[in-house]
Image (cartoon, rainbow, N blue to C red):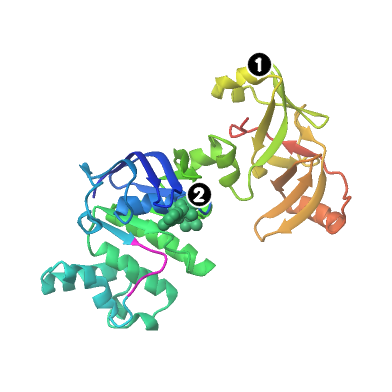
Amino acid sequence: MAEVDLTSVGKVYPDGTRAVTDLNLHIADGEFLVLVGPSGCGKTTALRMVAGLEEISEGEISIGGRVVNRVPARDRDVAMVFQSYALYPHLSVRDNIGFGLSLRKVPKAEIRERVERAAETLGLTEHLDRKPRNLSGGQRQRVAMGRAIVREPQAFLMDEPLSNLDAKLRVQMRAEIARIQRDLGVTTIYVTHDQTEAMTLGDRVAVMKKGELQQVAPPQELYDRPANLFVAGFIGSPAMNLLQGTLTGDAENPRLEAGGTTLTLPASVLSERPALASRFGSDVAVGIRPEDMEDAELVEAPEGSTLVSTAELVEAMGSDVLVHFAIDAPQVVTEDTRELARDAGTDVLGTPDGPRTDLVARFSPRTRV
Ligand code: ATP
């Protein structure tokens, strides 16, 4: 086990494409760090540089305190798990898991013992003598994990390991990976474009965009205090509502003027971000999470918290019902009660001009400006 450090790391591919810029990350010993971001943001490149599969153009990477910029992949003592499981079809599960150890000339008896221990951890004991083609997708993924575990590396590097599984299996394996990582306590860097995976797995989550780190924080902090509009929009499903308007009032009584509506904002938005003091009179975006919007008929609305709106679309998702509203230009989404959905749904679905439903914006500590 080891800590992993990236210091001012950059990557420019031979064709001139810049994939990563000035990336600084400290991953603590035993930590589970998730790198997340949209396609092409550079997360795979960053991981491959740690693995030694891609040259580092700028900066320094160290694993366990040792600078590895010039250390070949096989000597970095890390184990990579890919989205394509890359299993050897002609080898049994046992031999697939033990393959790396055989290459390293580990004594046979020890390989046997380590493979069986890994199989036990992964629930693969009864499949050890099967060939990969006779396994389900989830079991194959476990074998790929087994190959990483059995090496007892300083760090696990995982690149979208669940993306080839169906939705149900993905959720199941996600829990498995979390459990295994916790049990083994191995430092892990995990790449995904799926923010739910990032939020549920990571001790901390690093959000990247166009090769640059946007924010790195524990999942809840990312959700409650996104550092910028990109993170606010990327983390959370349905996404955070962003109301555009002008910041008016003063530090004690900040307000948002948006499309003829005046909303009273909590004074805490300024105490948390003093730089906003210079933004009075300017355009700002106020972020409100869907679960902080409520039907004005069902709750008492404090003055200055009501938005005049029209329900436009209802999406019933089983446990949650999402209601999309039009508030002048921007769209607002709320996770609300079934009653509101039923009211809105019966009258609104398929009707462009639905009934007016006023919304209460509950300004919680996670309201961001
Ligand atoms: P995805 O989720 O789609 O895998 P990603 O966030 O992992 O995306 P990378 O694969 O790291 O992104 O790619 C980052 C950027 O570098 C992209 O613009 C990509 O086109 C570019 N890139 C990746 N590999 C190469 C390469 N071998 N040569 C040139 N450019 C590359």
Question: In this view of the protein, can residue 132 be seen by the observer?
Answer: yes
Residue 333 percent across, percent down from the top left: 71, 46
Q: Amino acid at mark 1?
A: Glu
| Viewport quadrant of the C terminus | top right
Please report the bounds of the magenta region as a residue range: 81-87
Task: Characterize the magenta stretch by its predominant secondary structure.
Answer: loop
- Dot label at residue 252: 1
Q: Callout 1: few (<14), some (14-19), or many (20+) C-alpha neighbours within 10 Å?
A: few
* Label 1 C-beta lies within 8 Å of the nearest ligand 1 atom: no
Residue 39 percent across, percent down from the top left: 52, 54
Image position of 50 with respect to 328: above or below: below
Residue located 60% across and 25% down the image:
269
Which residue is denoted by mark 2 in the rendering?
37
Image position of 181 with respect to 104: above or below: above
Asked where in the image residue 357 lies, by quadrant, the reply is: top right
Question: Which structural element holds mark 1?
Answer: loop
